[in-house]
Every structure is written in C-alpha cells, then in structure tokens.
Image (cartoon, helix red, strand yellow):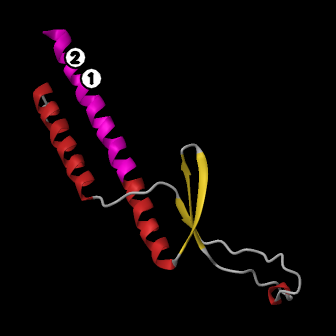
Amino acid sequence: MAKATSEERLADYERRYREFAAQLAEIGLISSGSVTRPCTRCATPGCKRHGNPPRPHGPYYQWTAEVDGKTVTRRLSGREAQLYRERTANDRRTRGVITQVRQVAAKAGELNIGQAATT
C-alpha cells in the first residue's frame, strides 16, 4: 500500500474536521454539572422515618455545578432532572468532539508547518 502524500493527509484531516463540525451542529443544548438523586437523613425528632431500619427522605433530584467559581446546587423536579441529564450528556459529547477537533487540527497544523519548512 502506497504511503499517502501530504496533500492527501491534509485533505483527510480537513474532511474529518468538517465531520466533527457537523456532529457539533447536531448536539442540543448543553449544561455543565451533574444530576444526582440523593436521599437525606431526617434530623427532626419523632419523625416516622427514624424507625428501625431508618428510611431516609427522598429521593430528590438535584443539579450541582460550578458557576463563577462557586458550587451551586439546585433542587429539581423529575422533568427538570431529565432535561438536565440530557444537557449534561450533551456537554460531555461536546467536550469529546472538541477534543477530537483539537487533535485533528494539531495534526493538520504540524503537516502545514512541515510543508512550509520544505518550501
């Protein structure tokens, strides 16, 4: 099998770059953070949940993220939790695609620099 020329490799990098850009266009809304479903222990004396075995309150949905350098937590309804889960998954997908875009762009840049040095 013949080794690909620099022009062919560069064309391949550009094609892959456009494919990643198309993937980004398909990703929906994003949100940083995570959604959890914690249960809480009751501190109220006499609460029926202090039985044997204890039954914690919940589960509740909550979203936690860092906003302006501070951790923010927000309680969510079931529907809101579903939306935030989708958006945080979209955020992870976006970050993964961007990582791949950077890798392809770096390889194309190295190839361009190598071509410029030989001309």
Quarter of the image where one finds residue 2: top left
The residues colored magenta run 94-119
Find residue 108 and report its horizontal and vertical position in percent. 23, 29
Quarter of the image where one finds residue 52: bottom right
Left or right: where does residue 26 sit relative to residue 71?
Answer: left
Q: Residues within 10 Å of mark 1 (few under 14, many from 20)?
A: few
Q: Residues within 10 Å of mark 2 (few under 14, many from 20)?
A: few
Amino acid marked by disc 2: Gly
- Where the C terminus falls, by quadrant? top left
On the image, numbered disc 1 is attached to which residue? 110
Q: Please, what is the dominant secondary structure of the magenta stretch?
A: helix
Left or right: where does residue 86 sit relative to residue 45?
Answer: left
Amino acid marked by disc 1: Glu
Find residue 31 and report its horizontal and vertical position in percent. 43, 57
The reply to whether the C-beta atoms of the residues labelled 2 and 1 are less than 8 Å apart is yes
At 77% from the left and 84% from the top, the residue drawn is: 55
User: Element type at marker 2?
Assistant: helix
Q: CA distance from mark 2 to mark 1?
A: 6 Å
User: Element type at marker 1?
Assistant: helix
Disc ID at residue 114: 2
At 54% from the left and 65% from the top, the residue drawn is: 35
Find residue 79 and report its horizontal and vertical position in percent. 45, 77
At 71% from the left and 81% from the top, the residue drawn is: 57
Number of numbered discs overlaid on the protein picture: 2
